[in-house]
Structures are given as structure tokens and as C-alpha cells.
Image: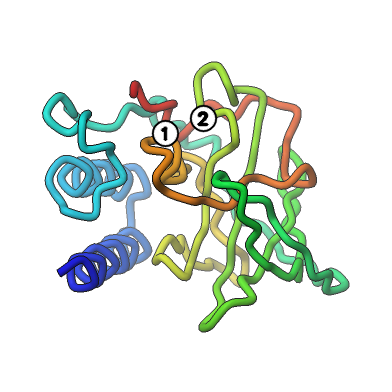
Amino acid sequence: MDALDLLDWKRRIFELYAEVRSASDPQAAWTRWREVRDELYGSHPQTPVAPGARASFDGVDYFPYDPGLRFLAGVEEAEPVSLGIAGSAGSTVRFTRFGVVRFALGELELYWLDGYGGGVFLPFGDATNGSETYGAGRYLLDTVKGSDLGMQEGRLVLDFNFAYNPSCAYDDRWACPLTPAANRLGIELRAGELRPAV
């Protein structure tokens, strides 16, 4: 059943990120993260890879690991603002902006999913979008789906090596929230997942 397949997918993603958070070596954790994602994307019933592309799928492409693109960022409270973030399928998803993270390369807004259970959502865009990476931006955190790099020393872990494409980058049957203008950085963040070859 699709529901049980989705449950299995979510369990495996949550377990993977728990493993990443507990690892002492971020680069080794990234290598493991890539291995598990390749396995899931290549064979799991809930893979975002389009059915017609699955037979030729041979793994996700990434920039090389760059330890200089891993940051510990303080979270500053922001006045809550409710907003609808546009989705890839013409939908709108309701979020509340609740904070801002500032780090060496800029600042990004943090959003809380207003739906049942909630969750922190951190999409971002950068100057690689549309050429090397997916045009609508990538995700770094989406805790409702398990993507959570954790906290260290009271600060949020922002490791852009773990940036990944929304599912709609692989197949437009998925509806994904897109990156709002406030989270588009004018620099190249050459880390994380590259644009899928679909």
C-alpha cells in the first residue's frame, strides 16, 4: 500500500538524519547520507525519480564536500508573519516565519509549517540555480519529513553539503513549496545536490 510505503520512506529518512546528527565526522556522515539516498532513490516505491527514469538512474550527483560550507548559526527570533509559499503545482502552502539565521555568507528566514504537526522548513536559492542546481532552489531543513541537521553549542547546524532538491525537481507529479524571495542568496553555494539529469 502506498501509505505503508510512505511510512517506510519517512522512517528511513528520520533514521538517516539521526545517524547524521550523531556522527562525529561531518564528511563521513555526508558520505553515508549519499549512500542511503542513492539506495532509496534507486529502489524505494516512494522515490521521487520519475517512473520512466528509474531504469537508468545511477545515483544523485553532488558538488564535492566542502567543509567551509558548514556553519553553526544563531537563530534570532523574528516577528511571526503568516505567509503562503507558492508550490510547484500551482498550490500554496501556509507557513509562519518565526526566525532568521545569520551566518558568514548571509541570512535566511526560518519557517514553521502551519499544518498538522508543524515543522521547521529552510529552503534557499543561490546563484547556481538554473545552471548547476535546480532552478527553484533547494532545501536544507524540512523537519516534518525528517531533514534535520540538529543543533550544536546552542546553534543551528547549516551544512550546505546536505542541501537537496525538492521532489518536484525529479518529477512534476510532486507538489513542492518553492523558495521565497527572502531566502534567495546572491552568491554561489557550490555544495549539496546538483540539478537532476531528467
Taking the spot 49% from the left edge, 51% from the top edge, the residue there is 175
Taking the spot 46% from the left edge, 60% from the top edge, the residue there is 149
Quarter of the rendering containing residue 126: top right
Query: Which numbered disc flags the more N-terminal residue, 2 or 1?
Result: 2
- What kind of element bears circle 2? loop
Q: Position of residue 3 (x, y in %)?
A: 24, 72
Q: Position of residue 93 (x, y in %)?
A: 63, 62
Q: Which quarter shows the C terminus?
A: top left
Quarter of the rendering containing residue 167: top left
Whether 118 is drawn above or below 78: the answer is below
Tell me the CA gap for discs 2 and 1.
Answer: 9 Å
Q: Circle 1 sits on which residue?
A: 193
**10 Å crowding of disc 1: few (<14), some (14-19), many (20+):** many
Outermost residue, right side: 79
Indicate the amino acid at tag 2.
Tyr
Q: Which quarter shows the N terminus?
A: bottom left
Indicate the amino acid at tag 1.
Glu
Marks 2, 1: nearer the viewer: 2
Outermost residue, bottom side: 117
Q: Position of residue 25 (x, y in %)?
A: 33, 50
**10 Å crowding of disc 2: few (<14), some (14-19), many (20+):** many
- What kind of element bears circle 1? loop
Taking the spot 32% from the left edge, 45% from the top edge, the residue there is 30
Whether 98 is drawn above or below 167: the answer is below
Taking the spot 53% from the left edge, 82% from the top edge, the residue there is 116
Q: Circle 2 sits on which residue?
A: 134
Q: Position of residue 86 (x, y in %)?
A: 67, 51
Give the number of marks: 2
Q: From the viewer's perspective, is 75 left or right of 149? A: right
Front residue of 183/196: it is: 196
Marks 2,1: beta carbons within 8 A: yes
